[in-house]
């Protein structure tokens, strides 16, 4: 069910055995993302439940879900990049069918994120699912 871009992340994680290297890779994915324009950093795009500042801006184009995101924390920005690879470009009706917990579990993130980051990640996934459902 996962997108090809997400499968690349899975393959990278399998290659990178050390968790410090994996964290570095997640941060690099975040650094490679285009920043979210300041005009989109508004209360409506802010994700509640995250310890750091997080914004997710959805768009539906041609029936497909797309989003831009950003955070003031490097690791969280990287997690947004991972979610982008998991969800961006899916038909809106498919977004809710993705088992994010299982897919992210393939990366081992569940065991290696702090409780706060895990809660924030869940809040981001829920926001994505809610946005896609509203657009469907």
Image: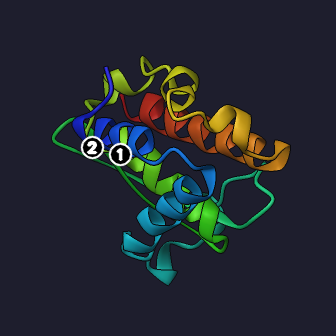
The x, y position of residue 131, in whole percent, is 49, 39
Tell me how many marks there are.
2
Task: Look at the picture and state if 40 lies above or below 12.
Answer: below
Q: Residue at x 33, y 38 (%)?
A: 11
Task: Name the quarter where the C terminus is drawn.
Answer: top left
Q: Can residue 18 be seen in this view?
A: yes
In the displayed structure image, the side of residue 136 where residue 39 appears, left or right: right
Please tell me which residue lies in front, 18 or 39.
18
Which residue is found at the position 65% from the left and 60% from the top? 46
Q: In which quarter of the image is residue 15?
A: top left
Q: Mark 1 points at which residue?
A: 85
Name the residue nearer the viewer: 77 or 109: 109
For disc 2, the marked residue is 5
Percent across and percent down for residue 107 are 52, 35
Secondary structure category for the residue under label 1 = helix
Task: Tell me if residue 69 comes above or below residue 120 in the rendering.
Answer: below
Residue 105, horizontal then vertical, whole percent: 57, 27
Name which residue lies at 37% across and 46% down.
12
Question: Does label 1 or label 2 sit earlier along the sequence?
Answer: 2
Query: Would residue 24 appear left or right of 121 to someone viewing this image?
Result: left
**Residue 13 relative to residue 51: left or right:** left
Of the pair 82 and 19, the residue shown nearer to us: 19
Report if the CB atoms under discs 1 and 2 are less than 8 Å apart.
Answer: yes
Helix, strand, or loop for circle 2?
Answer: helix
Residue 95, disc? none
Instruction: Inspect this view and state whether residue 45 appears.
Output: no
Q: In this view, does 39 lie above or below 55?
A: below
């Amino acid at each position: 069910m996962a997108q090809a871009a997400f499968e690349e992340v899975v393959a990278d994680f399998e290659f990178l055995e050390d968790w410090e290297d994996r964290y570095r890779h997640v941060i690099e994915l975040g650094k490679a993302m285009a920043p979210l324009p300041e005009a989109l950093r508004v209360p409506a795009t802010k994700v509640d439940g995250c310890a750091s500042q997080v914004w997710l801006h959805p768009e539906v184009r041609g029936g497909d879900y797309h989003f831009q995101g950003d955070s003031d924390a490097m690791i969280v920005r990287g997690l947004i990049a991972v979610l982008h690879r998991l969800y961006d470009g899916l038909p809106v009706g498919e977004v809710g069918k993705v088992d994010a917990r299982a897919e992210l579990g393939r990366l081992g993130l569940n065991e290696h994120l702090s409780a706060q980051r895990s809660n924030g990640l869940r809040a981001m996934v829920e926001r994505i699912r809610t946005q896609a459902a509203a657009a469907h």
